[in-house]
Amino acid sequence: MKPIAQTMLDKLWTAHEVLRREDGVSLLWIDRHLVHEGSHHAFGKLKERGLSVCEPDLTFAFVDHYAPTRRSSQTSDPQIMGMIETLRQNAHDHGVHLYDLDDPRQGIAHVVGPEEGLTLPGLLINCGDSHTSTHGAFGALAFGIGATEVAHVLATQTIWQRKPKSMRIRVEGTLGLGVTAKDIALGWIGKLGTDGAQGHAVEYAGAVIRGLSMEGRMTLCNMSIEGGARFGIIAPDETTFAYIKDRPFAPKAGAWEQACADWRALSSDNDAQFDREALLDASEIAPTVTWGTSPEQALPITAAVPAANEVTPAKREAVRDALEYMGLKAGHKLEGTAVDRVFIGSCTNGRIEDLREAAHVLRGRKAKIPGHVSPGSAKVKAQAEAEGLDQIFKAAGLDWVASGCSMCVGMNGDLVEKGQRCASSTNRNFKGRQGRGARTHLMSPAMVAAASVTGMLTDVRWLLERHQ
Amino acid sequence: MAGWSTDKGMAVCLPQANIDTDQLIPARFMSVPRAQGYGRFLLHDMRREETGDLKAAFPLNAQEGISVLVAGRNFGSGSSREAAVYALVDSGIRAVFAPSFGDIFASNAVNNGLLPAQIDEATYVALSQSLERRPQTIMIDLGARSLQLGSVGARFSIDDSWALKLINGWDDIDITRHHRTAIAAFKNIRHQTTVWAWPNGAD
């Protein structure tokens, strides 16, 4: 009898299933657990019950959400330092490896995990952060969890989970000049909505995905949660293996050979069936920006701000509300909208390739508006400095700061002022996300760089063409 | 955590879609220890003026003792912050009725005794119309997956395993510890067959 064709999700799920209850809920084994300052609630729950971390060698702690990006001035804030100190104490008490502020490998969990070779194909990775979907770019089952679940993973190294439905998004064709993984992400979320993939694990496939670098794949998987999917996955291939090889925690020698053989078998079978399918034509994707307060409110930079009567009745009120909050008028061109500041960084777009793309736009140009660049990790920062990218940003007038989640969520004090408009390479344009009353426009790092050059939302393709 | 199967509460409607967890609790409040209570942070920036005073027109501010929310689709999308659920629970909210929920939020809710009840669009419309002017009493029967609000009687859905957990007040850590032997056996086999899954591929 022919074996039943399996999706990558099926294979990853089966490989981690300790048991399945009669009600269909699975108990899954966790290979890597990443914790951060926000995990204090979970450590507190553990303490209440007198439990300790069950597998400290599979648990890694990161200072990222509250990391001061201007180390000296912010380190005096007792609230911020208290959060970091609590993480230090918990990591120390439980024997968990901590990437502390002064560590040359410090950075955002979703940037450092892959850099360190902690993130591998075929693993199950949890973190108390919704952007854990990032690690799915390697062919890992990776998803964000809440504090109670974090406590459960700390105590048992397992999690109860009902298997999600499967969805495949294929991207075929060729990406145009200035179009990046961020534009693919905003493109599909704009089409399908922020709950478009709710309850599903999204597998990204197709020629365009195969052609993406690991950085691009991570950006795409990272944004899965903004389309409602807790999981984003991409089949591992030679690009994946080349990225992982020789990283500090990656398998070595004989284990490497076995790993690569196992990883090659992870891809969805050719005739595997998905619960849902979507197809995107890459040539139709333009550099994209969000205009509203939800990632689904995204349009090509060439478009105009929509009016409430141009959308389905169910979404009209949301459009009116978003336009008011964002201070935008229906019918006005997105391109040319004045911007007050820019931010480049975050777990979505704070990797070396992101900085290269932004620097390429800024080379020999000046920024008209203030802004800052926060590399996703200290290693990205060092790499960028070795390539001279920091000099390009600084010469343009942007601040070059240390790594952390920074202005994506503002927990460290990097906030956008009320009413100010920020062109941002981050993942959420929610009201107040970057500060109360802040107006966020999401876009690729290259598009952010373009906005800084003109002081307006700008089609980066104009600037790229002039460079050629 | 105490379980519950029926509840009589006071419901209010927030007629908006995509109320994300950044709205439910802005990030700046998340360094506060839970023991201090998160209720005062619930929907802080939607609900309060910059002075901190409550906005009179905001539905949730209509009266004290609100324990049930009815809201638009995709409630609790975004960040995995369980603090969003703490803010609801610490404010006395027992249940949220919406056409859909963020996956992580729903899971967090159940872990804290808060019911994320999925209703169809027609029920949402009926409830929001009934609640347009003022809060009203609602009866919830978790076992029967039903609600009654004035003349509106309807069904809601929730994953069966979640309903059981809410009704019994079960705690996952206690349940999982019964499976200690199976977990140890699984780990042992994985370690033997998939050595690369351990950091650095060695023990």
Image (cartoon, rainbow, N blue to C red):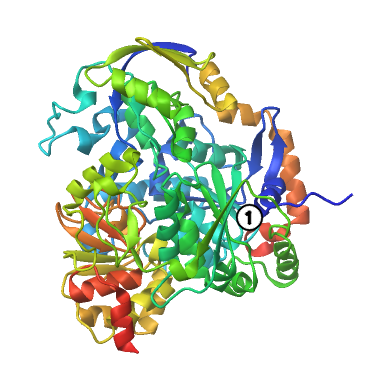
Identify the residue position indicated by label 1 in the image. Answer: A123
Asked which secondary structure carries label 1, the reply is loop
Q: Position of residue A73 (x, y in %)?
A: 20, 61
Q: Is residue A384 left or right of residue A135?
A: left
Quadrant hosting residue B15: top left
Q: Is residue B112 left or right of residue A410?
A: right
Q: Is residue B143 above or below residue B175?
A: above
Residue drawn at x 62%, y 67% as measured from the top left? A250
Q: Position of residue B61 (x, y in %)?
A: 20, 24
Q: What amino acid type should be assigned to the residue bearing mark 1?
A: Leu
Q: Quadrant of the C terminus of chain A?
A: bottom left
Q: Is residue A151 above or below residue A65?
A: above
Front residue of this view, candidates A127 and B50? B50
Residue drawn at x 67%, y 51% as measured from the top left? A12
Q: Is residue A149 left or right of residue A85?
A: right
Front residue of this view, candidates B99 and B102? B99
Q: Is residue A165 above or below residue A351?
A: above
Identity of the residue furthest to the left in this view = B51
